[in-house]
Image (tube, rainbow, N blue to C red):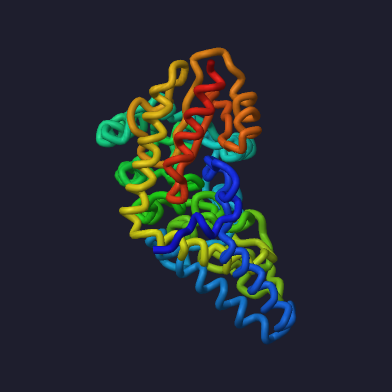
Amino acid sequence: MSDLRSLMPALANKSYFNYGGQGPLPTPSLKAIVSSWEKIQELGPFTNTTWPFLANEIATTKAILAKHCGVSIAQIALTENVTSGCILPLWGLPLSKDERILISDCEHPGILASCIELAQRKMLNIDILKVQQVIQGNDSQKEVKSIILQSLEDSLRRNTRLVVISHILWNTGQVMPIPEIADHLQSLPNKPFLLVDAAQSFGQVPIKAAACKSDIFAFTGHKWACGPEGLGGVAISKRVIEESNPTIIGWRSLKNEEIATHNFQDSFLKDSRRFEIATSCLPLLAGLRLSLDLIEQEGIEFLRIAKIQALSKKLWDELNNIEGIKPLIDGYPPAGLVSFQTKQKLDPKKIVDQLGKENIWIRNLESPKCLRACVHITTKSEEIDILAKAIKRLLI
């Protein structure tokens, strides 16, 4: 087992709880990026000797991502972030006037805004799936599944064609039962598409069961996977590849980048690459691969999530014992996101700023208005004590 924390300079001089925003990059991953860049320059950035190297970088990375998601390599598209991973295939879905989108009330504003704009352009209707009020803790996940599935059933309409929901809610930290949601949607006559924002799950919890059953499962490497910013991916179902059209179009989505054709349907690749656009920063691939490898060296998947849950349990306990603090989840969090509110009328942003002056980093959210601290496998137990004591001092 490696000591991943010692490889992260960003963790050397602070108490860091913002993995849900961006994870620290290990030095070996940074060096792998630089080495890849140097190799490209050595070969020549646009030469016949460079293409095999780049093709291997792409194929190797996609194979790793496909294994994590439980899908074929042909179903993985490389993107720059979660938003592009969601939006590029989303806008190509075969949706028609007056059909409906069901989106949860805990989605990131970027995805919500995209669905609203899509609805306006295609004259669709939007319904809200209420999940924010589900506050049961980790020991009540069977009950959580039952409540979510019932809420889904109550919210679906005859012409609902798309359901949009996150794997882990970015604000409350609740885990959504994606495999069960997918199974239910597939049992319906019109089989609505399922889009999943996996920004908070990739690199933190097992994703295979959710990813392989989703139609669009978008993730990023720069949060819990502790990879470089500017690189993400999306697992796309075979039916989306077959039934949807490309949206933003570039040479990477074409069968032949050298020859244009007037036959629109014959222009594009028949796999997930139809949703890739143009030139990307390929040296980042080496950094993400190494970060994923370093995380795996910290222990098998089951042990890693158990460690995260133990740390979030400790943080929940510490916060719950502070007069004036109320965690959003009524019980131990199922993953590493721990959100909480102050009973006093204190500005959450000012609390974040004050903690920052002590080199303690959390963040504030607006919907619901709360504070969020994230723990990962690199979090130290002492850091949680430092955070809890600092918050307690602020409330005196």
Quarter of the rendering occupied by the N terminus: bottom left
Q: Nearer the viewer, residue 225 or 359?
A: 359
Q: Position of residue 169 (x, y in %)?
A: 46, 37
Q: Residue at horizontal 25%, vertical 36%?
A: 142
Visible residue check, residue 187: yes
Number of labels in the image equals 0
Q: Position of residue 73 (x, y in %)?
A: 46, 68
Q: Residue at horizontal 65%, vertical 29%?
A: 353
Q: Residue at horizontal 39%, vertical 41%?
A: 311
Q: Position of residue 395 (x, y in %)?
A: 53, 18
- Relative side of 38 to 206, left or right: right
Q: Quadrant of residue 7?
A: bottom right
- Relative side of 362 to 240, left or right: right
Q: Is residue 104 above or below residue 305?
A: above
Q: Residue at horizontal 53%, vertical 13%?
A: 344
Q: Is residue 278 above or below residue 80?
A: below
- Relative side of 187 to 324, left or right: left
Instruction: Check the image and name the residue furthest to the bottom.
Output: 49
Q: Position of residue 237 (x, y in %)?
A: 43, 57
Q: Nearer the viewer, residue 10 or 183?
A: 10
Visible residue check, residue 163: no
Q: Nearer the viewer, residue 78 or 116?
A: 78
Q: Nearer the viewer, residue 15 or 140?
A: 15
Q: Is residue 195 above or below residue 98?
A: below
